[in-house]
Image: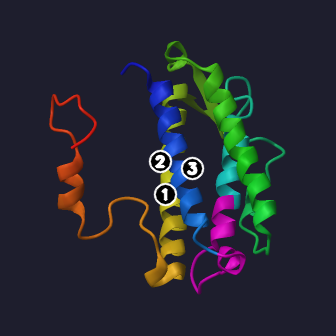
Amino acid sequence: MPDLIKASAIEFHRLKTMVEKALDQIDDAQLNHRAAVGNSIATICWHMAGNLHSRFTDLLTTDGEKPWRDRESEFAERKITRAELNVKWEQGWQALFATLATLDDSQRGVTVRIRHQPLTVEEALLRALGHLNIHAGQVIDRAHMLRGKDWTYLTIPPGESDAANARMPAPGDTSTAR
């Protein structure tokens, strides 16, 4: 598969953007709201950022589970401001994107370690995408539940699939307008 690093970067950016669009739809109280079961949106995002920061800082040279990371504290119940979350959030994503910018597909097979387990760079990226997708889904679902009928869909809204498909170019069609 050529250009795995570039394709991964695109997918990570898409995921980050979708979570941020969900976060934009909720207020600070909702950000910290903890349902009877599960974590608050703030807690999930805090964990995502901590994971990214740890995994992708010095990816090629140190274990992805850094000694300075306190994973358990990421799940501690806390009330944080959106500004505090944004700092932590950007720190994690910056570690990822800075590392991706230094990689190319020739390094896909290089061995890295996460919790002492050897993985290729390719496996580490796929693992990170899978992990982040789970949590992104949690954030989006919780934001949707909190927002209720005022939710703005991040992808094709229910009932609009046919119209969206009609707007898609046909195979071989190089025009952008339909």
In 3D space, how far apart are the residues under numbered discs 3 and 2 (Cα atoms)? 13 Å
Q: Write down the quadrant of residue 70 in the picture.
A: bottom right
Residue 116 lies left or right of residue 120; in this view the side is: right
Question: Which residue matches tag 2?
Answer: 130
Q: Write down the quadrant of residue 32 in the picture.
A: bottom right
> At label 3, which amino acid type do we have?
Lys
Q: Could you tell me which quadrant the N terminus lies in?
A: top left
Image mark for residue 16: 3
Residue 141 lies left or right of residue 29; in this view the side is: left
Of the pair 74 and 13, the residue shown nearer to us? 13
Under circle 3, the secondary element is: helix
Residue at (60% x, 65% y) in the render: 23
Residue 109 rendering spot, x and y as whole percentages: 50, 19
In 3D space, how far apart are the residues under numbered discs 1 and 2 (Cα atoms)? 6 Å
Please tell me which of labels 3 and 2 falls first in the chain: 3
Residue 35 higher or lower than 86, as above or below: below
Of the pair 163 and 50, the residue shown nearer to us? 163
In 3D space, how far apart are the residues under numbered discs 3 and 1 (Cα atoms)? 13 Å
For label 1, count other residues whose C-alpha is less than 10 Å away and answer few (under 14), some (14-19) or many (20+).
Answer: few
Residue 65 higher or lower than 77, as above or below: above
Please tell me which of labels 3 and 1 falls first in the chain: 3
Question: Which residue matches tag 1?
Answer: 134
